[in-house]
Image (cartoon, grey):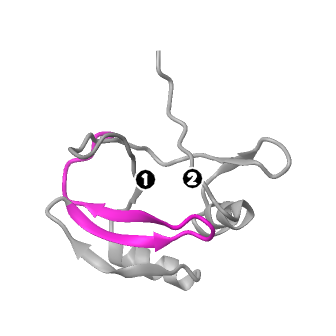
Amino acid sequence: MITGAHSLIYSSDPDATRAFFRDVLEFPYVDSGDNWLIFALPPGEFGVHPGEAGGSDLYLLCDDIDKTIAELTDKGVEFDGGIVEEQWGRLVSVRVPGAGTLGLYEPKHPLAPH
């Protein structure tokens, strides 16, 4: 049976991207050799949305987006634009060194792992 999921982020600067997740977001990790870090993720969920064939997105969840943005800003994290209010949550785009952006949102919907 399925025991977990392994997500990938592609980066033009893997060392900077790994440092972001290790040092800024402080995700636990293992080094599988030669600084090839594999990060543990917080509890997760996934949804299936209508759209063109294929594709996926990664969003990090938080309980209080204003507080999380303030904490990350203090660590030098940059954001693309401000908070967007959606029916399903409050969303912002986080700049990840070498890897573009990923979503951060405070959900307004029930969470699957809870």
> Which region is colored magenta?
89-114
Dot 2 lies on which element?
Answer: loop
Q: Nearer the viewer, residue 101 or 77?
A: 101
Is residue 43 positioned above or below 103 on the image?
above
Residue lying at the far front in this picture: please name it: 52
Label 2 or label 1, whichever comes before in sequence order:
2
User: Where residue 113 appears, x then y in whole percent?
Assistant: 33, 40
Q: Residue at the location (76% across, 48% down)? A: 36
Which amino acid does the dot numbered 1 rest on?
Leu
- Asked if residue 28 lies in the magenta stretch, the reply is no
Disc 1 target residue = 58
User: Where residue 95 appears, x then y in whole percent?
Assistant: 51, 73
Disc 2 target residue = 9
Q: Tell me: 45 left or right of 71.
A: left
Q: Nearer the viewer, residue 72 or 8?
A: 8
Q: Residue at the location (30% across, 64% down)? A: 106
